[in-house]
Amino acid sequence: MLNCEMRPGSQHSNKGALEFIRQSLGMTEMLGVDLKNILVRLDSAHDDAEIIEELLKRGVAFLIKRNLRKESREQ
């Protein structure tokens, strides 16, 4: 387990998530782990363009549940 965080239950899970992900990936690299060898899995609260861009930039494999919001499945 790496970089755990206690948060109030009323706080939205995406608040500060990008910085937390950057910090966690930095800690992973400090341990000598190649980011191409890890998988990041996030729920739909993190279906965010900035987060996806960060993971792509670092070459990290990821799975993020899609939040369709008002989009159709076909779209």
Image (cartoon, rainbow, N blue to C red):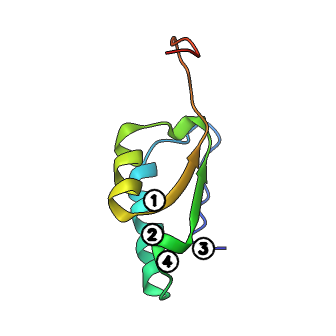
Label ID, residue 25: 2
Q: Residues within 10 Å of mark 3 (few under 14, many from 20)?
A: few
| Secondary structure found at label 2 | helix
The reply to whether callout 4 and callout 2 are in contact (CB within 8 Å) is yes
Q: Mark 2 is on which residue type?
A: Leu
Q: Which residue sits at x=50%, y=87%?
A: 31
The reply to whether callout 3 and callout 4 are in contact (CB within 8 Å) is yes
Q: CA distance from mark 1 to mark 3?
A: 11 Å
- Residue 23 against residue 14 in the figure, above or below: below
- The reply to whether residue 12 is in sight is no
| Secondary structure found at label 4 | helix
Q: Mark 1 is on which residue type?
A: Ile
Q: Which residue sits at x=57%, y=31%?
A: 66
| Secondary structure found at label 3 | loop
- Residue 29: image x %, image y %? 43, 80
Instruction: Determine the image quadrant of residue 59.
Output: bottom left
Q: Which residue is mark 4?
A: 28
Quarter occupied by the N terminus: bottom right
Judged from this view, the residue extending furthest toward the bottom is 32
The reply to whether callout 4 and callout 1 are in contact (CB within 8 Å) is no
Q: CA distance from mark 4 to mark 2?
A: 5 Å
Q: CA distance from mark 1 to mark 2?
A: 6 Å
- Residue 25: image x %, image y %? 45, 69
Q: Residues within 10 Å of mark 4 (few under 14, many from 20)?
A: some
Q: Which residue is mark 3?
A: 2
